[in-house]
Image (cartoon, helix red, strand yellow):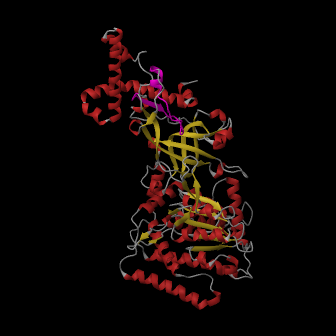
Amino acid sequence: MSIAEAMVANARRYKELFSLAADELLVQLEEEEAVANPGALEADGVRKLAATRRALELDNRRRQAAAAGVAGGAVEDVAEAGGPASDPFQIIPRALTRRYETALLPPTTQDAKTRPLRAIRAADVGRLVTVKGVVTRVTEVKPRVEIAGYVCLVCGHEVYQTVPERTYLPLTECPVRGAHDAGPPGRLVPTARSCKYVKYQELKLQEPADQVPVGHIPRTLTVQLSGDLTRQATAGDVVAISGIFLPLPYSGLRALKAGMLADTFLEATAVAQLKKNYADLDGAGHTPEVAAGLAALAADANVYGRLAASIAPEIFGHADVKKALLLLLVGAPARRLADGMRLRGDVHVCLMGDPGVAKSQLLKHMTSVAPRAVYTTGKGSSGVGLTAAVLRDAVTGELMLEGGALVLADCGVAAIDEFDKMGDADRTAIHEVMEQQTVSIAKAGITTTLNARAAVLAAANPAYGRYNRAKTPAENINLPAALLSRFDLLFLLLDVPDAAADLALARHVTTVHRTGATPVAPPPPPPADGPDGGGGGDDDAAAAAAAAVPARVSPAVLRAHIAAARGSPPPLVPPGGALAEYIVSSYVALRGEEAAAGRDARGYTTPRTLLSVLRLSQALARLRLAPAVAREDVDEALRLMAASKASLDAADAAD
């Protein structure tokens, strides 16, 4: 077994050995520093205390040696060597004077991969392991006692106790008086001046959804962070944490019931973010491939089309839906007015349609593209699970909040599948989130507001499973108007039999399954005259189709460009009144069309629609990295809104 393998197998012991070795090497450096800079000793209270204790111990030895008739030089030699004359109860722990932290980083070899939470066994206790998961709960950073200091009320000696675990049993009797005097031991009193505290934080790590077997509950693991590792992750982050897997004995009444059982935790040594926010991606060191892709996009006039074609390329069709999803990722800048009112900038999209039109696949793809996203289903989610729950901490007994799916998706995407299966009481919990983008809590004496600045992407089926053309769109959608008006775009996706569309869809799906890659263009039809003749026209058609499809970019380039767009200065409507008046007149025209339709109106045009037009226009300008909104941005926003309403008209036209 190599030294690296031994360190991984017995990580905690090697960590302590490295700390002891560093202490021995630093003793001489500290002595030289004290001689060169005497003021440094006065500024460091712990080092001054240690020097004072060593001087007092040396004086005590001199007096004892004088009484025993031992030469003073021999006493100093024994004291400097720390020989048997040393009093074990008065020795200051080495950890009290340490001004550094020792950490074991995970191996960087090719076979050093993250391990699933379900793969960790009892044989891994004491080993250095690396696990990946989603942070679901984070406690506040608090001071934890690492070295506890006491003072004896009788003899005045200071006694120290090393606290390696989260809980410990404080000392009550003075061991110094009990060892040297015949009288009763003195009572110890804790002193904060003699204690050493470290920053301490706990988090709950839940295994990713792709590692949970069907029908099983996701497993969680408690992770203890200390020192500089605190505040490295927040709820909703996807992280890889390296640490020492250790048992955690139960305390209190639970220890009586648990018997020989113990809980487990991970003593973290390194935290790495795997799925960062857009703010973390913007300006990060890109690979040469990503940098080249960004440069190509900057020189391309059809950035909008290329990026939209790069979203879920395995899914056939849905061009306008993919453009809407691209704008959902980009979003518009949120605005806060002078009176404190906040106008949201996130774009909400709802996809409703028949089964088998790739709604769920689009949601899954969006959660993989967005740097921060949470996927949940309406049937398996409650109002508390979507917003926040009030829990009691098992150690401190304090009430704490655990964020739900919408809180975990803050500054990201919240994908809710089977939106129509949610109960009315649970569905109303997201009304505040979709407009004010906050979660208000008033439970168990806790009154607070949590941020939930997430773009909601919902997928739902019609009220009757499939779209019933004998019913009106409002009866088929079966969602309250208060909720529908909060969605910027609502697309109705129907499975309508059509020979040409079905043929193109079937060829696309079979090509993906056969080659495992996305076709650049729709596969051409077979030659009419067989394989040996009449194929020239089909080749020309295939070439024309390939030229019409924009060149796609990789997901890494897509994320990098969106991060750059979101980090750019917010585009605003030009101060001139021409474009603003055009937006106003377009909104008034939409209201007039709905008023003329009367009961036959296909959608809800409310004042929120005007804000939706502004959000979509700003998102389009953001995508082009433009400083201001242009006329073509407003036209494209109006076209997308018209396309969403046209999908409702197409349902009646297909009857």
Residue 22, horizontal then vertical, whole percent: 41, 27
User: From what the image shows, is residue 218 above or below residue 450?
Assistant: above
Residue 18, horizontal then vertical, whole percent: 46, 28
Residue drawn where x is 49% and y is 84% of the image? 586
Residue drawn where x is 63% and y is 77% of the image? 480
Q: Which residues are magenta?
A: 155-181
- Nearest the viewer among 571 and 174 is 174
Q: Quadrant of the N terminus?
A: top right
- Apparent side of residue 581 relative to residue 45 in the rendered image (left or right): right
Q: Is residue 409 magenta?
A: no
Q: Residue 607, can we see it?
A: yes
User: From what the image shows, is residue 464 above or below residue 364?
Assistant: below
Among the 4 quarters of the image, the one containing residue 121: top right
- Nearest the viewer among 283 and 194 is 194
Residue drawn where x is 55% and y is 65% of the image? 442
- Apparent side of residue 495 relative to residue 572 in the rendered image (left or right): right
Among the 4 quarters of the image, the one containing residue 595: bottom right
Q: Residue 319, can we see it?
A: no
Among the 4 quarters of the image, the one containing residue 606: bottom right
Residue at the farthest front position? 183
Residue 138, horizontal then vertical, whole percent: 53, 51
Residue 16, horizontal then vertical, whole percent: 49, 29
User: From what the image shows, is residue 590 above or below residue 309?
Assistant: below
- Nearest the viewer among 292 and 181 is 181
